[in-house]
Every structure is written in C-alpha cells, then in structure tokens.
Image (cartoon, grey):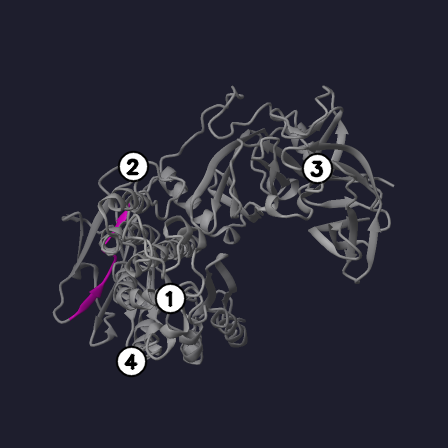
Amino acid sequence: MKKAISSIFIAALISFFSLFGFQEKQEQFPPEKHEVEVRLILVDVIVTKDGEFVKDLTQEDFELYEDGKKVPINSFELVSFEERELKILEEPEKKEAVPPRKKLAVIFDAINSWKREIKIESEKIVDELFSLIKLGHEVMVLQLDRNRGLEIIQPFTTNEDFIRKAVEKASGTIWKLGYDIAEPIEETVEDFAPSRPNDVAPEDSQLVGDAEYYKSMTRLEYLYREQQKFEKTIGGILASCNMLRDLPGRKSILLISAGIPDLSPRDILPNIRSGIAGEEIERVRDDKLYGTIQNMRVFDPFNILKGKTFRDGEEVIKEVIRYANAQNVSLYSLDSDIYVKNIYSGTTAEYYQQYQAAHLKTREQDKIRRVQNLAWLSEDTGAESLRGSKKFDQFRQVMSTDLTYYYQLSFYPQRPEADDKYHRLKVDVKHKGVETRFRKGYTDYSLEEFNKMLLITAYYNPSVFEQLPFKAEYIPLITKAGKYEPWMNIALPARDIFIERFIEHAPKVFNLHIWIRDKRSGEKSFSGDIKLPFNINPSFMDFVKKVDYLTFHFKGPELPFKHNEYKAVLALVDPQTNEIGAWESSLDIPDFRKSKEAAVVNCVLGDVTQNPKPARKSFSLSKQDGSLEYGQIKFYPKVTNQFFKQEKASVFAQIYFPQGNGKVQPEFIIRGKDKSVRYVPGELVAESWDKKSDIWSAIFSLDFSQAALGENSFSIEMPGVGEKIVSSREIQLTILY
C-alpha cells in the first residue's frame, strides 16, 4: 500500500528567515513588474426631494469638486436595482432573467449594545429586512463580538427563514445589562488603587482610602475597558468594508448599535486628576496616570501604520471614514439604545459595590458622544443615521430608496499616483429643493498603505480572513531562566496554497506577521514578521503534489510573560495578490509557582528525527530550523495534529512539579467521538529537570494504532491522590487510515 506523506519540514528551501528584525542574506529575487494603472475615482450620489428619489437628472445637472477645484466628470450613470422583468431577445425560450440584486450587510453590534436593547426590537428588524428582500435585495447578517471580532452568521441570501434564524442568533448573544460593570480589570485596580481598606485613615497622604480616588481609579479602569471595546469595534467596521470592497458600485452596511465608545484622554484626564491630593502623590501617582493615558496607542497597538499616531477616538474614526469612502462603502446606522428609557435608574447602582456606581454615571455622560460618533460615521460616508421613536419608518423610506437608485459619477484624479492623503469631495446639483448625500472625502491609499490597513483589520478579526488557509501553533516554551520563548509553528496546505493558486514559475514570497498582546490590560508583548521565500519551478511543483502540508518552525526572542491571558494572532500575506489568512489562539500563562500541586504547562504533539549535530542534553530551540533539540534528538511540532494509524508519534510536555526532582508519571488518553476512552502507552525518550523553576520537560513516543479513525481528543493528565486529576491539557487529534 502506498503511504501518503502528511507533512514535512522544508529546511532545504529556506536557509534562514528574517525574524523580528534579524535577517541573513537571502536569495535575491528579480524586481517585480508593475503595469501602469488607469486610476478612476467613483462618487455615488443620492438625490431626493420630499423623501423620494429624483430620477430625471442628467450629467449637466451635476458639478463635482475635489479639494475645492472643479473636476470634469468622466462618466455618469443612474444605477437602478428596481425589480423588473428583463426581456431576452437572443434566447426566446427564456421569458425572464433575474435582475441584478443590491446587497446589504447588517451588523449586530454585540460589543456596545446590551441584549435587552436588541432583543426587544429584533422582530421589527426582521420585518424591515424582509421588506427589502421583497424588493429584490440580498441580505447578509454579521455579528460584532467582543472576543472574536466580526463574524459572518449568514452569507448573502434572500431566504427569510435563514435571515430570521441569523437575527435571533445575533440578538441572543448581545451583552447583558451590567456585564462589563460587574467585572473590573483587576490589574488596573491593583496597579493604582490603595491597598488599605476604606475605613483605615492614611498616615502618609490623603490619597489612601479617599472615595474620590476610588472614583478616579474606576474612571481609569473604565477607560481601559472602553479602549478595548473601541478597538474591537473599529476593527470590525474595517473588516466589513474589506469584505465588500470587491463588489461593484456603491456598497451598503447597516450597523445596529448603541454607539461607538468615545476615547478622548484630554476629557478624561481632568476627572482623574480631580481625585488626587497631596503634592508628593500628585507628583508620583499623577505622572503615572498621565503617562498611562498619553502613551496609550489606540487602534494600532503594534505601530503597523508607521508615521501615524492615533491618540484619541476622533482621529481613528476619521481614518475609518476615509477608508470606507475609499472603498465606496456607505455605513448606515440604527441606534438601539433608544429602546430602553433609563437603564441607570432604580436600584441598579445599589446592586453593585458603591465605588462602582461611577461606572453608571460615566456611561450616562458618554452616551450622547457615543451616538454622535455613530451619526458622524454614517453622515460622512453618504449614509443616514436612524434613531428616535420613528426610526423604523425612516428605515423603510431611506433603505428602500438608497438600495434601489443612486447616481454614479467618476473622474480622473490630477495626480498620477496615490499619495496616501485625504481629499475633500463636493457635489453640487443644479436643481432647487433637492437634498443630496455623498461622501465628503476619501484617502487616496497606495497599495502599501492599503495593505497595512488590511493587516490591522486581520489582527482584530482573524476569523474573517480565510483567503490563505493555514494552521498554526504558538507555544510559550519555558526556559531555564523562568521566562518564555515564543515557539511559532505553521503548516501551509500544499494544494490550496501552491497548486490551486499556481500562476507561473517564478520566485514567490509570503509574509508571516506575528502579534502577541495582553488580552485584559491591552498591553502589547511583541510583533514581528518573517519572509517565506519560495522558488516556484517544475521540481518544486512536483514535490508539493506529494505532500499535504509544508511545515515551518521559528524561535522568537525570550519574553518575560506575566501570569495572564494573551492573544496570539498570526497572519499570512501574499503581497502580490493582497490575500490574507489569519489564525488566532489564546495563551493562558498560569501562576503555577504559587501552587503546591503539579500543573501541565505545555503539551505538544509532533515528530522526532535524528539530530545530525548532537546538542546538549537539555531542551533548547534551534535558531537554524526552529526544532526542539535534546542530544541526538530533534522534535518538530506536528501543527496539524493529523497522524496515520501506524505512524510514529511523539509528545513533548512541560510540567510544573513542586514536589521536587521525583518520578513524574503523566497519563495519555484518547477520547473518541464515539465516547470511547483509550489509554495510550507512552515510552520516555528524553527528560530534563530544572530545579530552579521546578519544571520537568520530557519527550514520549506514543502508539496511536488502537485509536479510532477520525476526530479524537488527546489529553495529558497528572493524577493526584486517589482518582483526582490535579492538572490536564487537551488537544484535538485526527487519526487517518
């Protein structure tokens, strides 16, 4: 029987990868060829009179201006999606054809809205979406989630049942009232709040135990939380623009939200300063608070947009508006917050701790600015902001009109190349009594700047970017110094990446971007990029036809991770096609050193090979190929966790063992979908003990021959006294025939 190869490490193809700024000399590829592009700027215009679209205008009725200068209109068209019967003269057997459909993407904002707000009116929302379907429009339903970013719940469809189920799912996962109020960010409070209880009078300052100080700290905590919500919201809006950018003409998005958080440190800082007393405390504490806010990098935490600095929400929203306008996307908004009269009245504040009542007051003050941000986003992208008691009547009128007709004008910009600058737009219509809506301006993005915006979007919404599929594994390897070395591993599906996308025999480069960030406090850990160069020739293509995956392994710089939860995002980019694939994982760094029981820190499935250059008998990552070395052994993570039934498999484990240098006996178990449980024998191949950190590292060879075919769950468990399991780590495993 011919045995297929599931994955292979291609060390011969790549001599060395640049990682985090360190790069060796690589193969010099010939310069890319660039064709001259004819640049045409599209401007869509909605013209209404008494709420009805005006359909009898001509090109002579319009004047178009860029940066205050009149520009000639290159083309003019009335675009109509009105439901109608099309006669096909060439094919008389066909009585009618399906007319082109206008598409509307509907986003439920589960970051800034509460479940009660959306749920009450979900039926009305569904009814209005159905009315659009009856006019011949297609609807997509998405959700903006605080953890996962933008998610597609239902692709474009005209099926009413599909849309109803999608709306129910989206509205059912909105935040519940008080969710973010009841969960303070502990590290923020610990960093700034006094350690003594409130009833203890301070000896060294008036700060400790001061109720006003607690209010200030609550405000700072609220600022951190709002920053995270703001960044995720902005990232989701950008992702929605990117999803629709390839559609022709005017693109429409409806954002159902209670508003966009307002991040204005200059407004927040005085509120914090007012709660601080004493000259010494003013110097020490206030400097720290001020530095925290001033150094806060919103929206672009890893400085991807080099040369641009965003210090408050207004700057970021401006950037988003200009980006949406550059993609011809109009962002309509429907304010959900009006459904609830006054969510802050009654006993809500009394339900929580007294010092957290400042949250409620802060929200009341920020509510107006949240809605203003929402309206700003809509109005400057040529859309409408729908709010108030008659917003559904307004929805029916505006959306049915805007999704059916618009005028499309175009012009050639005076500059030959994109300049990454903002350019104002103005449209005058020579008719009295009409109202016009159009984009106020746009940023003329170069390809390089556009790709940077895509990267930022991928960081906040990795699940949306699936153009380049790949698998990845990020392992925080514990070193002897007690720190962590990032061990990054990726697997590229050979058929999807190289065979199905094959264009020509030529050098090819993929860029791999890595970001690690503290999920709770928002602090960044590190970022970097790696170039993956390939020489696409006949022999390479013959080779990739024989393998399922090409796997690559990298060692990162040693990091002093805190005991916290981190977000790891890897993005694979094809710079020639602008295609992106992204992968995300959560890293939970436990404070196991304070525990008296054993704890599984790492568990990695992989392959063991012979090391041609024997290393020391202690585990370390190779700088050359990213493998884990121990004496004559090289261990490579599998990444895909796919093994053939008779294939040799290994597992690398790191276990915290505070009992000392004793005999560690972990158990390996496979649980199948059929609920079967199989204990897997493991033979110890290599082990190392670090007395300083009480970390035991080992490699075991495994026998998967008795495992069930298909999807399984593999776990390593540390048994305690009796039948108690003190620690375990679970991995998804696929057994192939």
Mark 2 = which residue?
417
Q: Amino acid at mark 4?
A: Lys
Can residue 694 be seen from the camera position used here?
yes
Mark 3 = which residue?
696
Q: CA distance from mark 1 to mark 3?
A: 54 Å
Q: Which mark is residue 390?
A: 4
Q: Amino acid at mark 1?
A: Leu
Front disc: 2 or 1: 1
Q: CA distance from mark 4 to mark 3?
A: 66 Å
436 drawn magenta: yes
Front disc: 4 or 3: 3
> Viewer-proximal residue, 724 or 138?
724
Q: Residues within 10 Å of mark 3 (few under 14, many from 20)?
A: many
Q: Which mark is residue 283?
A: none
Front disc: 4 or 2: 4
Residue numbers of the magenta segment: 434-443
Q: Main secondary structure of the magenta part?
A: strand
Q: Is residue 677 above or below residue 55?
A: above
Mark 1 = which residue?
254
Work out whether mark 2 precedes mark 3 in sequence or the reverse, and give the earlier one. Answer: 2
Q: CA distance from mark 4 to mark 2?
A: 46 Å
Q: Amino acid at mark 2?
A: Glu
